[in-house]
Image (spheres, grey):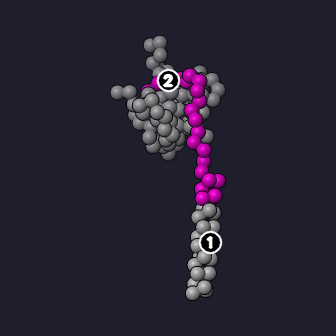
Amino acid sequence: MVRKIGSLLVILLLVVILVLLVRQVQLTTTRPVPTAIPSPPDFVGWVLSVDPGSGQVKVESQADKIVRPVTVMLTKDTLIFRREKDVLRQVDISEVYLQDQAELWLIGPVPSSFPAEVHVRQMIVEKLY
């Protein structure tokens, strides 16, 4: 009887240790949730095309009645968010849709080439229609 209780205590202790180890691994491997850049965007326009294979999104702005297309080059460091009911949710390129409004935070100035190719730190997309 004492032997069975001792064996059960050892098994219980091993289970507790295993649970604690799994929890510690989860805490150390969970990526922190990034926050959006609080400054105003550098460029606002509409999504014309999305190419997940190349990581490119074509966006066109019509500010001041001037059409300005840009090809957005996404990198592994680019933060992409979708705004829904004033709440931002981090997404990947698969949730960027045609005719979304896109707000872009650029890395460097917009080149004078046509259409310009830009790299972005952050992109927030939103369905407005």
The crowding category of the residue bearing disc 2, from other C-alpha atoms within 10 Å (few below 14, some 14 to 19, many at least 20), is many
The crowding category of the residue bearing disc 1, from other C-alpha atoms within 10 Å (few below 14, some 14 to 19, many at least 20), is few
Can residue 36 be seen here? The reply is yes
| Residue named by callout 1 | 13
Q: Which residue appears at 63% of the width and 58% of the height?
A: 24
Instruction: Kindly indicate the quadrant of the structure image that contains residue 119.
Output: top right
Judging depth in this view, the residue of 83 and 67 nearest the camera is 83
Instruction: Kindly indicate the quadrant of the structure image that contains residue 21.
Output: bottom right
Q: Which residue appears at 57% of the width and 84% of the height?
A: 4
Can residue 113 be seen here? The reply is no
Q: Name the secondary structure under disc 2.
A: strand
The reply, left or right, for residue 44 in relation to residue 99 is right
| Magenta span includes 33 | yes
- Classify 76 as above or below 48: below
- Classify 9 as above or below 24: below
Q: Which residue appears at 47% of the width and 24% of the height?
A: 45
Q: Say which quadrant the N terminus sits in.
A: bottom right
Label 1 – label 2 distance at C-alpha:
58 Å
| Magenta span includes 84 | no
| Image spot of residue 9 (x, y percent) | 60, 76
| Image spot of residue 99 (x, y percent) | 39, 30
Q: Amino acid at mark 2?
A: Val
What numbered label is drawn on residue 44? Answer: 2
Q: Name the secondary structure under disc 1.
A: helix
Q: Tell me which segment is drawn in magenta.
A: 23-49
Judging depth in this view, the residue of 64 and 101 nearest the camera is 101
The reply, left or right, for residue 20 in relation to residue 85 is right
- Classify 57 as above or below 13: above
